[in-house]
Image (cartoon, rainbow, N blue to C red):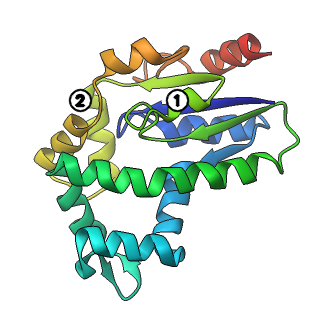
Amino acid sequence: MLKIGITGGIGSGKTYVCQLLEKLGYPVFYSDIEAKKLMTKDPKLVSEIKQLLGDESYIQNELNKPFIAHSIFHNSKLREAINLLVHPKVFQAFELWKDKQSSTIVFNESALLFETESYKRFDKNILILADNETRIKRIQLRDTLSAIEIKNRIDSQLTDEEKIKKSDFIIDNNENVLLIPQLISILENLK
C-alpha cells in the first residue's frame, strides 16, 4: 500500500483536491480534522494544551479557535510546541485508519506536512499550489479573517519554493488548469 501525503498552503485548495480523489475512489485521511477532534476528545492532549496555552484555550470543552490561532500564529515557539503535542497523535490515528483500508493507495491531507517533517513518513508527496491572490480570495470567502490575519497565516508556513524542493508531484490549482487531468497523471505515475 502506497501512503501519499497531500499538502499546500492555506487556501491552496487541499480539501477540494482531496474530495476529487475520494470521488475517484481513493480513501483520504484528513489530518487537520483529526487534529481538531483529538484536541477536544483526548483528555491527555487537552490537559497538555491547557498547560501550554492556559485554560482560555477551551470554552465549554470546545477549542477556543480564535485564541489558539492568535497565540500560535504570533509565536513560533508555541506553534512548534503545539505541533509536537498534536502531530504524533494524528499520525498514530492515520496508521490505525490506514490499516483498515483496502485500497492500494491511501492519501493523507495535512496542512503542515513539510513544517512538521511528516512528509518523510510517506512514499510520495503532492503539493497543491495557488498564487497568494487566489488563496486570499478563497480564504476570505470561507473564513471571517482580515487580510492581515490571512497574510500572517501564509507567512507562518514554509514558502512554496521550500515546499517544491520536497515534493514529488505538483498540482496547479490557480483555476486556470483542469485538476482532474493533473490528478489522473499523478495516479498513473503512482501505479
Report if the CB atoms under discs 2 and 1 are less than 8 Å apart. no
Q: Amino acid at mark 2?
A: Glu
Mark 2 secondary-structure assignment: helix
Q: Kindly identify which numbered label has been placed on residue 64.
A: none
Left or right: residue 49 compared with residue 91: left
Amino acid marked by disc 1? Tyr
Between 132 and 118, the one lying in front of the other is 118
The answer for how far apart the CA atoms under marks 2 and 1 are is 26 Å
Q: Is residue 126 above or below residue 141?
A: above
Q: Residue at x 52, y 29 (%)?
A: 119
Q: Of discs 2 and 1, which sits in the foreground? A: 1
From the top left corner, tell me how far across and down residue 118 is, in percent.
50, 35
- The vertical placement of 11 against 42, above or below, is above
Position of 87 with respect to 4 (left or right) is: left
Q: Label 2 belongs to which residue?
A: 133
Relative to 171, residue 11 above or below: below
What is the residue that sits farthest to the bottom in this orientation? 60
Q: Nearer the viewer, residue 106 or 53?
A: 53
Decide which of 50, 182 is in the foreground and name it: 50
Quarter containing the N terminus: top right
Image quadrant assignment for residue 174 = top left
- Indicate the position of residue 37 as horizontal and vertical percent values: 53, 67
| Residue found farthest to the right | 102
- Neighbour tally class for label 2: few under 14, some 14-19, many 20 plus, Cα within 10 Å: few
Q: Quadrant of residue 105?
A: top right
Give the label on residue 119, or none.
Answer: 1
